[in-house]
Image (cartoon, grey):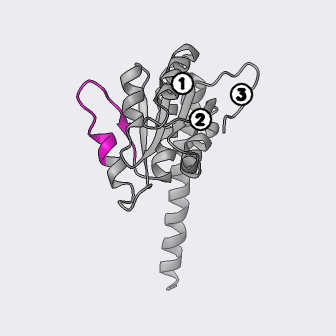
Amino acid sequence: MTKQPAPNDRPIVGIVMGSDSDWPVMEQAAKALDQFGVSWEATVASAHRTPERVRAWVDAARHKNYHAIIVGAGAAAHLGGVIAAECNIPVIGVPIEATSLNGLDALLSIVQMPGGVPVACMAVGKAGAKNAGVFAAQIIGRSNTEVAARLEIYREEMVREVEAKAAALERRIAQGQ
């Protein structure tokens, strides 16, 4: 699951998930980062099953000087909080639908972090993962003019898409369809 960066393009965002079954959701974060030209790498680590792997990964993330970490986790969703407790890199949590509670358990686990150990929380599932990628790009865009410019283009494209859809709907209504 690790995307190999170009030789001079070190990853600046880490994507971590509790299980490889989370990749279809978390891939949306990777696609968003790709859209903004932000290099990333991804792995699987479990706060409960492989706590030493999580600690080693966070230590490596600090040395790699990541700008943000996107974490996908379901059920108790402790992974983001454990990572946030181990470093000062911004952590963005994505609740995953992994139990019969459809991600509500993960959502509540991520948003209920104690004061002083923040984890930003996105929506449950693919939309949340996409937003996590956009949010990480916004963090990076504060100090990277190329990423900031791509974000502006992205927003302009969203406006054009909505305007085109509105015009098409209004035409269909006017024609009685």
| Mark 1 surroundings within 10 Å by alpha-carbon count, few (fewer than 14), some (14 through 19), many (20 or more) | some
Label 3 to label 2: alpha-carbon separation: 14 Å
> In terms of secondary structure, what is the magenta stretch mainly?
loop
Q: Which residues are magenta?
A: 108-122
Identity of the residue furthest to the front in this view? 49
Q: Residue at coordinates 38% horizontally, 54% vertically from top-left?
A: 103
Does the rendering let one see residue 140? no
Q: Nearer the viewer, residue 107 or 172?
A: 107
Q: Is residue 91 left or right of residue 1?
A: left
Q: Secondary structure at mark 1?
A: helix
* Total number of numbered discs in the rendering: 3
Label 3–label 2 contact, CB within 8 A: no
Q: Amino acid at mark 3?
A: Pro
Answer whether residue 76 is magenta in the image: no
Answer whether residue 110 is magenta in the image: yes
| Mark 2 surroundings within 10 Å by alpha-carbon count, few (fewer than 14), some (14 through 19), many (20 or more) | some
Q: N-terminal of the two: label 2 or label 1?
A: 2
Which label is found at residue 101? none
Q: Residue at coordinates 37% horizontally, 38% vertically from top-left?
A: 78
Q: Amino acid at mark 2?
A: Thr
Which label is found at residue 43? 2
Quarter-wise, where is residue 43 in the image? top right
Q: Residue at coordinates 30% horizontally, 26% vertically from top-left?
A: 117
| Mark 3 surroundings within 10 Å by alpha-carbon count, few (fewer than 14), some (14 through 19), many (20 or more) | few
Callout in the foreground (3, 2): 2
- Residue picked out by circle 1: 57
Q: N-terminal of the two: label 3 or label 2?
A: 3
- Residue picked out by circle 3: 5
Q: Nearer the viewer, residue 129 or 35?
A: 129
Label 3 to label 1: alpha-carbon separation: 18 Å
Q: Amino acid at mark 1?
A: Trp
Q: Nearer the viewer, residue 176 or 31?
A: 31
